[in-house]
Amino acid sequence: MDSKQADLDSVRSYAAEIPVSWLRCRELGHNWGPHSARVIEDGGFDRVLRCRRCPTKRYQVLDAFGRIVSNTYDYPDGYRMPPGRGRITGDGRGVLRVVSIRMGIEADQRRAVGRRDRGGV
Ligand SMILES: [Zn+2]
């Protein structure tokens, strides 16, 4: 595991390269929905959750009381920072939020221009 903190320029270029839906997941958290589940031998459960916004999957093992035994994640290629560039923490997470917010504002402005061009208000 990469323990050093990613520098902010690396985070900026990474944020500009990934799909905006992935960026939303990185800054807001995944939007999990149940996908499949089965009962396992000790009465617990294996279940798979899928994000509704990005291709990430989460494999969860629960005991018979519903307590989470383990969580593992399957991320799409490119979802995480390239190896060796460090982890996104602290101000790096702030960079993800700023890029995400700016993209949202720009998309709103493009939609507003589109409406004007079509003769709307
Ligand atoms: Zn997601």
Image: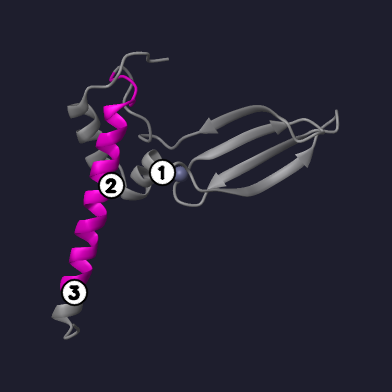
Cβ atoms under marks 2 and 3 closer than 8 Å:
no
Q: Secondary structure at mark 2?
A: helix
Q: Is mark 2 within 8 Å of ligand 1?
A: no
Out of 86 and 56, give the one closest to the viewer: 86
Please name the amino acid that badge 1 sits on.
Leu
Q: Secondary structure at mark 3?
A: helix
Q: Secondary structure at mark 1?
A: helix
Task: Look at mark 3 in the image and give the residue it sits on.
Answer: 114
Give the residue at x 37% y 49%: 21
Q: Sequence order check: which comes first, mark 2 or mark 3?
A: 2
Q: Is mark 3 within 8 Å of ligand 1?
A: no
Task: Look at mark 1 in the image and give the residue it sits on.
Answer: 28
Please name the amino acid that badge 3 sits on.
Gly
Image check: 91 left or right of 54? left
Q: Which residues are magenta?
A: 85-113
Disc 2/disc 3 C-alpha distance (Å): 21 Å
